[in-house]
Image (cartoon, rainbow, N blue to C red):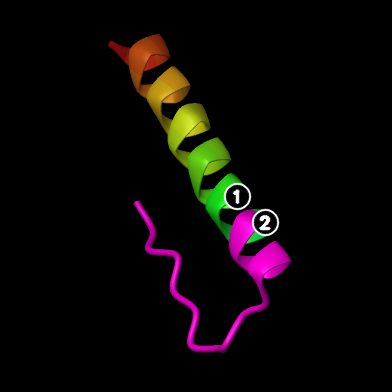
Amino acid sequence: MFVLEYKVKPKPNQIEAINEAIRTTQFVRNKVLRYWM
């Protein structure tokens, strides 16, 4: 388990990239959790 944290003033496209990374991370984590269940 880890926390994604950023203390910057991101540009809109950076916000989009960060949100995409978070979604991908959550998706992968859910896949792994299902695999281990």
| Residue 4 sits in quarter | bottom left
Q: SS of the residue at dot 2?
A: helix
Residue appearing at x 54%, y 53% in the figure? 19
Label 2 to label 1: alpha-carbon separation: 6 Å
Which of the numbered marks, if any, corresponds to residue 17? 2
The three-letter amino acid code for the residue at tag 2 is: Ala
* Lateral position of residue 19 relative to residue 36, left or right: right
Residue appearing at x 67%, y 77% in the figure? 11
| Residue 14 sits in quarter | bottom right
Please say if 31 is above or below 26.
above
Q: Within the magenta stretch, is there residue 15?
A: yes
Please say if 22 is above or below 35.
below
Indicate the position of residue 24 as horizontal and vertical percent values. 57, 37
Indicate the position of residue 7 as horizontal and vertical percent values. 48, 88
Please say if 4 is above or below 5.
above
Which of the numbered marks, if any, corresponds to residue 21? 1
Please say if 37 is above or below 27.
above
Q: Are marks 2 and 1 in contact (CB under 8 Å)?
A: yes
Eye-nearest disc, 2 or 1: 2
Viewer-side residue, 17 vs 34? 17
The three-letter amino acid code for the residue at tag 1 is: Ala
Q: Within the magenta stretch, is there residue 13?
A: yes
Indicate the position of residue 10 as horizontal and vertical percent values. 62, 80
Range shown magenta: 1-16
Predominant SS of the magenta segment: loop
Residue appearing at x 60%, y 49% in the figure? 21
Indicate the position of residue 28 as horizontal and vertical percent values. 52, 30
Q: SS of the residue at dot 1?
A: helix
